[in-house]
Image (cartoon, coloured by chain):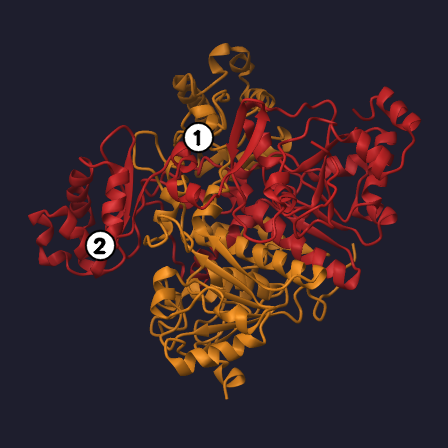
Amino acid sequence: MSSEYFADDLPLNGIKVVETAQGVSGPYAAKLLASLGAEVIKVELPEGDWSRKAPPFLSETNHTESSALYLYNNTGKKSVVLDWRNSEGLHNLENIIKSADVFIEDWDIAARKKWKLKPGFFIEKNPQLIELSITPFGLSGPYSSYKSTPLIQLALGGILNLIGNPEQEPLMLPGHQPDYLTGINGSNSVQIALWDRDLLGEPGKFLELTMLETLANLHQAPLDMDGGIRQRSGHRQSPLSSTGFPPGVCTVSAKDGYVTFGGGSPAIWEQLCLMLGRLDLFENEIFSNVFENPESGLIVDHIMENWMAEKTREEVFKEASSVWMLPVSPVKKVNEILEDKQYASRDAFLNIPHPVAGEAAYPSPTFIVNGQKLKVSRSPMLGEHTKDYLW
Amino acid sequence: MSTVEIIPSGALRHLRIIDLTRVWAGPLGTRTLADFGAEVIKVSDPRMPLSRVGKVNNKLNRNKLNIALRLDKSDGRDVFLDLVSIGDVVIENFRPRVMRNLDITYENLLEVNPNLLMCSMPGFGLTGPYSEYPAFGSTAEAMAGINSMIGYVPNRPLQTGLSYADPVSGLNLVHAILAFVRRRAVTGKGSFIDLALADSPLGTLGEFFVANSATGYEQHPNGNRHSEYAPHGAFRCFGNDQWIAISITNDFQWEQLKDEVNDIRLESPDYDDISGRKVNEEAINRIVEEWTSRKDAGDLMKQLQQKRVPAAKVSNNLDVLNDPHLNRREYFSHFRISEENIEKYDGQAIPGNQKERSKWFPMRDLGEDSNTILVEYLGYSDDKYLSLLEQEVIS
C-alpha cells in the first residue's frame, strides 16, 4: 500500500469554516472538518467557550487554557475573540462569515429571539454559505425550548432506558456521547452539503441538525420491537427481538477484572460451550433463550467465572480469540488503553504539547488512510488569532 | 417498485457503492449514504437468506439494491470484479482473513478500477497484534473503555447492551467516505481506509484520555452521578419502570426545582450552592424521589421544563416511536409493506439533500436486483446470466 503524504492534498483544503458553537457537538464537528484540512476559525465570546471552564483541568492554576474537554474538541482551530452580542461584534462576525464556506452555530430559539438572528440572516449575505445549526431539539416542535444535558438527551432518545439492571435506575453513557455522535453527524451533514454545492452546483443552505434525532436514529433494534419494550439487561447484551438468544453474551469477572463476551448466535454459543468443555449445555434446550429462562444465564455466568477464576483478562482474551475465535474483550480502563499494544501500533493516540496545559495523549482521527493517520495540531488559546482576522 | 429510478434524487445520486458489509456498523453507514441518494449495491451470499424477522433488515438495509453472489467461486469473483469496475466505492467489514481467502484486496481491485475508494472495517482494523481476532460492537466498546465507566458501583462495570462501537463506527464510516470521495472527485485519486470498530469509541471519550495521560484522572462507574453537579440522575416515577431524568447544573435550576418539590427539608442553607448539593447528594436524591414517585413521568417533564429545569421522561423504544416532538418534526419514515400494512421506521437524522422520501424503499430480497445489475449495468447476455444462475454463482 502506498504511503502517500497528504500535506497539501487533504479533502477539505481551501474550505473555510467559522464556528460560534460551544461545548462538544458543534466544536467536535468542526474539529473533524479541521482534521480533513479545513481552516477552522473558532469565534469565542470574551469569556470563552463554556467548555474551557469544564473540569478536569490539566493545569492547577490556569483554568482557561487547560480543560481536557476544550483541549480535545478544538484541535486544529484558530481562536478569534469577538462579542457578537453587540452590534460592532456582530458586524465583525458577519465580515468573517462573508468569506466562509461553512458556519456552525448552536443558537436555540431563545437565543435567536434575544439576538434577533433569523435562520437566513448569514446566508442572505453569503448565498454560498452552508450554515449548520446544532441544537438539542431543533428550532421547531414541542420540545424546542426544553433545557438539555447529555443525561436528558439519553433519556428522551430512548438510550438511557436500555442501560443498567432491570429493576434499578437506568444508566447513562459516560461523558458527552450524545454530543459527540451529533458532532460526527454535523461533519457528515456539512460534507454532503459541500458535495452538493461544489460538485453539483447547488447553492448554500441552512441545515438543522438535532441531538434527539441523532440518538433516535442509532437504536440497534427497530423501535417498534413488534410492539414489545426492549428491556435493560444489566451485564448482558439486550435482545434485538422477541426471539432472544442463548446465555454467555455478558460481562463477567476473571482473575484481575472483567471480560465482555459478544455473541447472540447458536454458532457462537456452541463455540463458547466447547471452550468451557461443556457441550452438554449447548445440547440442552433449557439454555436456548436466556431472556425466557434467566436462571440459565446465572448458571452460565457461574461456569464462565469459574473457568476464568485463575486466568487474567489478557489470558482469556488471547485464548478465546485466537483458539476459539470468539468475540471477546477485556474491560479496559482508560490508563490501560493508553498502554495497549494494539492501539499503540495503530497510532491511536498522538502526544500533543500545549504551552499552558503541557503534553497529553489525544485520540487521533479514528481511521487510517493510505497507511497513515491524519495529523492534528493543538487547540488555540483564547483569542490567540484575533489579530490575524480582525484589524 | 422499479429498480432503476428514472430521475435519481439526493446529493449523492452520482455515487455507486459496492457494499459487502454485514451486521450493524457497516450497513448503518452504507444506509446513510443510500438515504442521500447513493446507489448502494448490497452483495449478499446466496446461501444466507436476509431475515425479515424483527424488521432489523428493513431498518438497516433500506434503499439498497441487492445482488446475491458467491464470492468464493471463481466465476462469482469475476462478476464481482466487473461490478467493482463500474463502482466508485467498495466497503467491507469481514475479518481480514476472509478477504485474503477470497483474494479480494485493494491492490487486486485497483487493477479493474484504478481510482477506487475502498474502506475495510474489521473489528480491530487490518494491522496490529489483535487484527486477526474477531470483535463485535459489544466487545469493541469494552476494549475502548466505555464499559469501565458504566455501572452502579466502582468495581462492577456493565455493558451498554447496545453494541455502542457499532453506531459510532457507522457514523465515522460516513465521515471518512465523504471526505475521500470528495478528494477523489477533485484529484482523481483513490484511497484505502482502514477503520476499526475498536478505534471509534476512543474518539468520543477524548477528554478522558487527555486528562488521564496528563494528570492520572480516572472516572469510575458511579450511577448517573455527575462529578460536580447534583441532583443528577433518573428518579422513579408512578407506574411500572417509569423514570424521570433530572440534571441540575446551576443554582437557578435548583431554586426552580425546589419550588416545585416544595419540601421543607430541601430548604437547608447547606444546599444553596453546587458544592453543598454535591456533598449532600444522597439526602437530596431521597427527598426528590419521594416526590417524583407519586408523579407521572411525562406530566412531570412538562411541569419541570416549563420552569426551565432540565428534566426528561426516560423513554422506552415505544415512547420514542410515539414521541410527540419527533412526530411533529416528521422525523420518521413509513413503508407500505403490503396492501393493509404500513410500518414506521427511523428517518434520517442528518439534514440536507436526501433522496426524495416518496422514493425510499424497504429491504430488497436476496438477489432481487441480480438480473438488472448483470444484464443492464454490466451488459451480460441473457445466456451468461442464465448460466451463472444455473451454476449457482448468483441467485
Task: Give the chain letter at badge 1.
Answer: A
Q: Amino acid at mark 2?
A: Lys
* Quadrant in the picture for the N terminus of chain B: top right
Task: Give the chain letter at badge 2.
Answer: B
Q: Is residue A253 visible?
A: yes
Query: Dividing the picture into quarters, in which one does residue B352 lie?
Result: bottom right
Q: Position of residue A244 (x, y in %)?
A: 49, 22
Query: Which residue lies most toward the bottom here?
Result: A391
Q: In the rendered image, which residue does mark 2 sit on? A: B278
Residue, x 80% and y 40% (percent of image)?
B104
Q: Amino acid at mark 1?
A: Arg
Observer-nearest of B180 and A127 = A127
Letter of the chain shown orange in the rendering:
A
As drawn, A382 above or below A158: below
| The disc label shown at residue A236, or none | 1
* Quadrant in the picture for the C terminus of chain B: top right
Observer-nearest of B119 and A386 = A386
Q: Position of residue A303 (x, y in %)?
A: 45, 22
